Amino acid sequence: MQPATGANRLVTLAVAAAAIVLVGGCEAQWELYDAAALGSARKLLVMPAVGAPGADGPHVGPVQTGLLITVLDQTGRFTVEGPCQSRRKTIAETGMGQAVWDQAFQADLADQLDADLLVVSEVYDFRATTQSKSAWYYVGQSNWTESTYCVGVSLRLISPADGRAVYFGMGEGASQLGYGPALLDATRAALIGVTDYLAANPAPQAYAEGGHP
Amino acid sequence: MIARVAKGVLLMLLTTVWGAAGCGPPNPTHFDESAVAGIHSLTVLPMVSSSEGAGAFASGLTLVHLMKADLPGLTVTEAPALWRLSRGATVMALTSAADAGGRIGADGALTGTVVYVLPPKDNANATATVTVQIFSVGSGQLAYENTGTAKDGNIPNAFTRAIAQSLIAFEDHLRKTRKQ
């Protein structure tokens, strides 16, 4: 057998990476529109995620919101706040009327909560597919079903002052264990552009020493 | 040489027949060119759908589609996300879209409706039908309306293709009438 050349190794690595992605069932697509805004962001305000179509989907919104807060917090780069304070302030000041469409109010709220970016998310796919299986044994036939849980997540980081998109990501996950691991995989896949950017652009030393800003 | 010319003529004939038969991109159901001419900033509001989440998802993809299209003389932004803080599903009525656009400070407000059929089985195609409506904030009138439908095994692809189809005439018009 001949020793592997550089090109051969590269091809082998690419094939292995593609196989890992396919077996893991994760797909991601992302765009970073404003790297400077992401790099300088210190506090993120996560808005409630919207649930998915289908029988199992409508109640997944709050689960996705919580998961998103956790995954963003795990980057160690941001202070991440859930929807509680923003909901309280918005209800107190607008009564959830037409003023929720006021761009200046959103900018003011983000300012009051000291937030740099808003995080909005939707779960677009949330369903289980089942496959019937059977096998013959010496004593007879055994039948069973195997379920695969499929989840798709879309998310955007938005500048609260003017509504400009800073980042867009979409990710998919599949698991035979349940919706939880699939949702986690999909969320991580949708955020891959953010995590890659943060890994390539570490926080300044003073900022990093204090942990969260 | 003669064969090449014959091929070219045949291709031209086929294209003409195809266009005359109405197989080209369908005309939008409503297109007020003078109202569209006044829109230089567009805010994307959540769309309405009977399927949970499909409206907000389609709005997000529409925003991304328009940003990628990089249309001349048009800035595109996402509408304030504060409506998400409401516990009920309160997506605005279409008639108040222009009013919301005014509060946001844009010239135009994009919203619409989404019909989405979830594939029940593996390898089944998702069907998305997106009707895009663009309101002129100044006049409060509908400036553009069109519908796109697409089927695809990949859910985001079905949405993206339906959105692209619904916006094709709007995009073509801006590219023809505005300078980069």
Image (cartoon, rainbow, N blue to C red):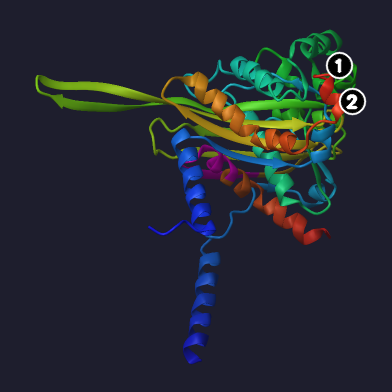
Given this view, does label 1 or label 2 mark the residue nearer the observer? 1
Q: Quadrant of the C terminus of chain B?
A: bottom right
Label 1: few (<14), some (14–19) or many (≥20) C-alpha neighbours in 10 Å: some
Task: Name the outermost residue toward the left.
Answer: A139
Left or right of residue A12, residue A198 in this image: right
Camera-side residue of B157 and A203: A203
Residue type for callout 2: Ala
Residue occupied by mark 1: A113
Left or right of residue A142, residue B70 in this image: right
Q: Chain of mark 1?
A: A
Left or right of residue A4, residue B171 in this image: right
Residue occupied by mark 2: A104
Residue B130: x percent and y percent?
59, 39
Residue range of the region highlighted in magenta in the rendering: B146-160
Q: Is residue B23 above or below residue B15?
A: above
- Mark 1 and mark 2 lie on one chain; the one further toward the N terminus is 2
Residue A93: x percent and y percent?
86, 11
Q: Residue at x 40, y 30 (%)?
A: B120
Q: Chain of mark 2?
A: A
Q: Residue at x 52, y 87 (%)?
A: B5
Camera-side residue of B1 and B97: B1
Camera-side residue of A75 and A151: A75
Label 2: few (<14), some (14–19) or many (≥20) C-alpha neighbours in 10 Å: some
Q: Quadrant of residue B111?
A: top right
Camera-side residue of A76 and A185: A76
Q: Is residue B54 visible?
A: no
Q: Mark 1 falls on what kind of element?
A: loop
Q: Does the segment drawn in magenta span residue B151?
A: yes
Residue A63: x percent and y percent?
59, 16
Q: Does the segment drawn in magenta span residue A200?
A: no
